[in-house]
Amino acid sequence: MKIENNLNYAIISNNINKELLDKFTDYTIIDNMTYSLLVEKIYNFPSKTIIFNNTLYCYSDEEKKEIFSLLQKRNVNYINITSNIEDVIYSDYLLVYYNNQLIMEGKTLNVLQQEKLLKKLGFNLPFTLNLAIQLKYYNVLDELYVDNRKLVDRLWN
């Protein structure tokens, strides 16, 4: 897989296994670790691309945002390989794998709007985006949101 500079990727997969991870042998893969250890590792990370292997699911939204902000400040791109659809909203580009086959790819919001195909593959939409789509359908909103805080702010204003 060719990684473009200044793009952050998410890979959603129903089956994260060695075959999928072998596509990224040229990069450092980060598995489960504590938040503080991950932050320390990012500060000392020598490369320009880091891969998270189902690492971020246990962190709060604030911790995830802090991690991504730190990566941006350090000019480190990332690939977030995950089975948690909620974690893909932090990425610019999304690849959807099903049984180790690439099914679709594109800008994250564009891919997430392919709701019927994602559901056929067994993936739901991120909660906030799903809610925003439903509210847009009923003309409560005129645009889509993936950030919960922005959605709530918009609804209260």
Image (cartoon, rainbow, N blue to C red):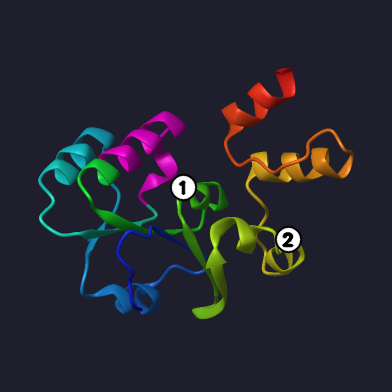
In percent of the image, x 29 and y 56: which residue is there?
A: 77
Instruction: Report the residue that reaches farthest toward the right.
Output: 138
The quadrant holding residue 47 is bottom left
Q: Main secondary structure of the magenta part?
A: helix
Label 2 secondary element:
helix
Q: Which mark is residue 54?
A: none
The crowding category of the residue bearing disc 2, from other C-alpha atoms within 10 Å (few below 14, some 14 to 19, many at least 20), is some
Residue 32 is situated, as x and y percent measured from the top left of the image, at 30, 49
Query: Is residue 105 covered in magenta?
Result: no
In percent of the image, x 20 and y 74: which residue is there?
A: 26
- Seen from the viewer's position, the closer of residues 139 and 88 is 139
In the displayed structure, does residue 38 sit left or right of residue 65? left
Three-letter code for the amino acid on which mark 1 is drawn: Tyr
Q: Is residue 149 visible in the rendered structure shown here? A: yes
* Sequence order check, earlier mark of 1 and 2: 1
Identify whether 31 is placed above or below 102.
above
Identify whether 7 is placed above or below 131.
below
Quadrant in which the N terminus is drawn: bottom left
The residue at which mark 1 appears reads as: 90
Identify whether 49 is placed above or below 38.
below
Q: Which mark is residue 115?
A: 2
Residue 153 is situated, as x and y percent measured from the top left of the image, at 64, 22
Residue stretch in magenta: 55-70
Residue 49 is situated, as x and y percent measured from the top left of the image, at 24, 61
